[in-house]
Image: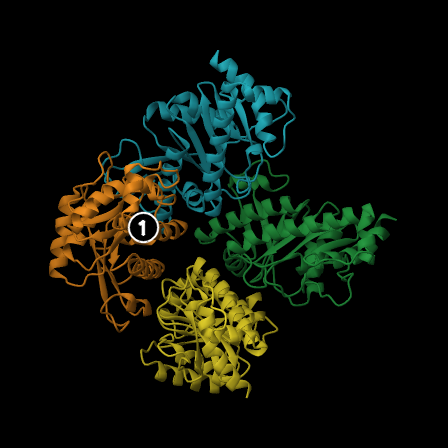
Chain colours: A orange, B cyan, C yellow, D green
Amino acid sequence: MRRAALRHCVVTELGLLCASFFARPTGSPDAEASMNPIFAADDARIAALADSLIAACNGFHARNWVPATGGNFSARLDDGHMLITASGVHKGELTRRDFLVADLDGRPLEAGRKASYETGLHTQLYRFDPAIGAVLHVHSVANTVLSRRHDAITLRNYELLKLIPGIMEPSTPVTIPVFANDQDIAALSRRVDAHMQEQTGLPAYLIAGHGLYTWGATVRDAKHRLEALEFMLECELWNGGKNHE
Amino acid sequence: MRRAALRHCVVTELGLLCASFFARPTGSPDAEASMNPIFAADDARIAALADSLIAACNGFHARNWVPATGGNFSARLDDGHMLITASGVHKGELTRRDFLVADLDGRPLEAGRKASYETGLHTQLYRFDPAIGAVLHVHSVANTVLSRRHDAITLRNYELLKLIPGIMEPSTPVTIPVFANDQDIAALSRRVDAHMQEQTGLPAYLIAGHGLYTWGATVRDAKHRLEALEFMLECELWNGGKNHE
Amino acid sequence: MRRAALRHCVVTELGLLCASFFARPTGSPDAEASMNPIFAADDARIAALADSLIAACNGFHARNWVPATGGNFSARLDDGHMLITASGVHKGELTRRDFLVADLDGRPLEAGRKASYETGLHTQLYRFDPAIGAVLHVHSVANTVLSRRHDAITLRNYELLKLIPGIMEPSTPVTIPVFANDQDIAALSRRVDAHMQEQTGLPAYLIAGHGLYTWGATVRDAKHRLEALEFMLECELWNGGKNHE
Amino acid sequence: MRRAALRHCVVTELGLLCASFFARPTGSPDAEASMNPIFAADDARIAALADSLIAACNGFHARNWVPATGGNFSARLDDGHMLITASGVHKGELTRRDFLVADLDGRPLEAGRKASYETGLHTQLYRFDPAIGAVLHVHSVANTVLSRRHDAITLRNYELLKLIPGIMEPSTPVTIPVFANDQDIAALSRRVDAHMQEQTGLPAYLIAGHGLYTWGATVRDAKHRLEALEFMLECELWNGGKNHE
């Protein structure tokens, strides 16, 4: 019931998101929908999630972590849907229009829209763990250079490791695996899934020459984890990546 | 006919571009021109192209890719004209006044203005390929340092290579040639042209100690390609430029 | 008398700080408090100190010196109290709400609030020297990388050393000690205190993998010292940290 | 006559500069002075010079070229006076109040103000060459690190060398001397002067561990030269400073 309402609402309200800079005619289906308090509430929630992803992404672009159309960002809407950046949009100039709603098989709910090429890596995470509420993927110089050099990056003795769930002591090593890059996203996503089934509590992973994926319960949590990881990877880059596999 | 109209319009409307912060007297030739819907449309298009080059350039300057007056930016107007930055203007403070219209021999249409010293490198590209709609030239630390060290830079195994037209697999190598710097722009432009005739599909080139030229169908496309290339060159700089010629 | 007034005022006025974006009902205790000129003056002073820490911190975040929730900031209010960032807040998005008042044993005056985990390192400094008016702790890439490599960093022959109190000649060496990181903040704070009792005039210290603590008579002084130290540490990072212990 | 008028005007109008955020009482000497068109014009010119130095400096601080109170900025007012930053002011937060007018012996015209410690290095330049209209001194990581390693930095094969007066070919080498740091500014300034008498056309110099001095006919020219030099020094830093003395 709730999901059906959301599905309808989303299709309707995405139009509203896209049209948010324009006046909407009184009496139109959109106007009626927005008088429905449930729809209106969902619309506000979707808009707030988009805005929070946009704000995070503007900060990442300023740091050169999402050059051009690189990177993807998503947030879970419910147990069957997510909000995700559309394919091919510039990550320093995102607007609400650059997001779409897709189900957890990666199918956009609105006809004619195309989700990010790497949608399958987002859906893998949302299906793997219902506690994951947001997924962030960035290409920084540090994560790209290190991911091309090593098979895994082990971080240790950084105070910021305490931002990783379950890490209470900075001396506890945290290993970020590096997967080989693959244009077959379904196959890559299965390899990630198999790894995560074995190594529980993984906080992030790298794809060689392609960047970092990390996540969290909320956009805020995922952003904090991302900033901490990118900081430690930049330190490792200055260290010359010694002592990694 | 269309070209003649544009030529007239450009001469007229460049004044309009330059005067855009001031009121224009009613009944003046400019005011009449702007009542002509064709002229008005062209003016808006020229202003929009200038604004889009300015916005891109502000971002490049913030990243230190266009120190002082370094760099040049242009966009095609039609099959015989382009909008290009004037000579000697600071690239972090561009205004509409800092652009001029020139034909594809590099001659400014407005008397008394001087196009960028490197105009010939822009006209070579517009003449070489009618699909090129914008040309961006920047001096970044990464492209400058690498262009002084190597005769060519080969990029491989970067996901962002997929932003280069024709590249579907990040494992496909893309070679960016480095031309020796030359104050004889006509001679340099002939060498570039000869290279591009031989090596079709070239996405960009470097000039030693002088920076990167890249292009695209639109300002947006060229900017995306530039951001992707500069990102990969910065990664190569951290790699110490190993494995390049 | 003055302290009692402040203590009362602080409890009252912190609510005011937190509520500063909302209207306050006329006739409420807060409204009465703010009619008391002493309370109003204290409130303005607390708000001004918070704003000055926020402004400093925004600059530090822009330079990537306080990734995610890393770093802590405080300012002395009187001989028994300080204003300090709350636990777990993002340092690039601080608002007045993210500060609390604590006594110099680190106990928040307002029930239900939690001071930064590292409060004990701030209170050690305020108790050690009554002339210390502000304490800043940041995690930069330079200070983190160097603090993991060395047991002490000696700075010499930098003009900016003259920003360190007592240094009149840039050739005078200044040694910044590196303490081992420790999750037992009380123990770490005792080691810092013992060191400062022996080595008078210490301007700053590092904690391995954890960052820099520095201070000054005012937020402004501490910020100037921090900018100077981070600049010299970044120079040392480029030098490869030669000649350090 | 003109100089006497300026001298009077400056003393008067500096008060006006300092008071520019406040209302000035009608009928006061300031108000009368500002009714004198010559004084008013000079005031506007001084304010414009201060604003142009402030704008330049904000850009330099954003790039971390003027940490804390490091750096000094000045512009010539006439053949006997300059506008210069006051002593000890933060270079990322300059306002018009942070400037003062001094004669070319470095004496502030307004009682009670203190010019920058390094005023003598500015006056040396204005006395040495009447064509110098602005002097900029910055501490960047690149110029500081290189100035500590080398006795001179020779730049060659950078297109941006053409921003140095007299350089038409990027292959022409330009040598930036490095002077030993000295707290006796008068002595240091005599060494600089002796060097400039011998090596005509010097575009800039470094002081070891202390930064770069450069200049130009206008603030704009000096800023362009500075951006070009800092860019080339940053390239040299990545090159490891090979091939320098």
Label 1: chain? A
On the picture, is B80 further left or further right than D93? left
In the displayed structure, C204 sits above or below A187; it is below
**Residue C185 location, x and y as percent?**
35, 80
Q: Nearer the viewer, residue C81 or A157?
A: C81
The local crowd at label 1, few if under 14, some if 14 to 19, many if 20 or more residues have their Cα within 10 Å, is some
Q: Quadrant of the C terminus of chain A?
A: bottom left
Secondary element type, mark 1: helix
**Residue D81 location, x and y as percent?**
77, 54
In the picture of the structure, the residue carrying the numbered disc 1 is A44
Please tell me in which quadrant of the rendered image residue A226 appears. Answer: bottom left
In the displayed structure, C73 sits above or below D73; it is below
Residue D194 visible somewhere in the drawing: yes
Residue at the far bottom: name it: C1
On the picture, is A214 further left or further right than D58? left
Q: Nearer the viewer, residue D154 or B114?
A: B114
Residue B155 visible somewhere in the drawing: no
On the picture, is C125 further left or further right than D189? left
- The residue at the point 31 percent across, 35 percent down is B164
* Amino acid at dot 1: Ala
**Residue C86 location, x and y as percent?**
39, 72
In the displayed structure, C130 sits above or below D221; it is below
Q: Nearer the viewer, residue D185 or B204?
A: B204
**Residue A203 location, x and y as percent?**
22, 61
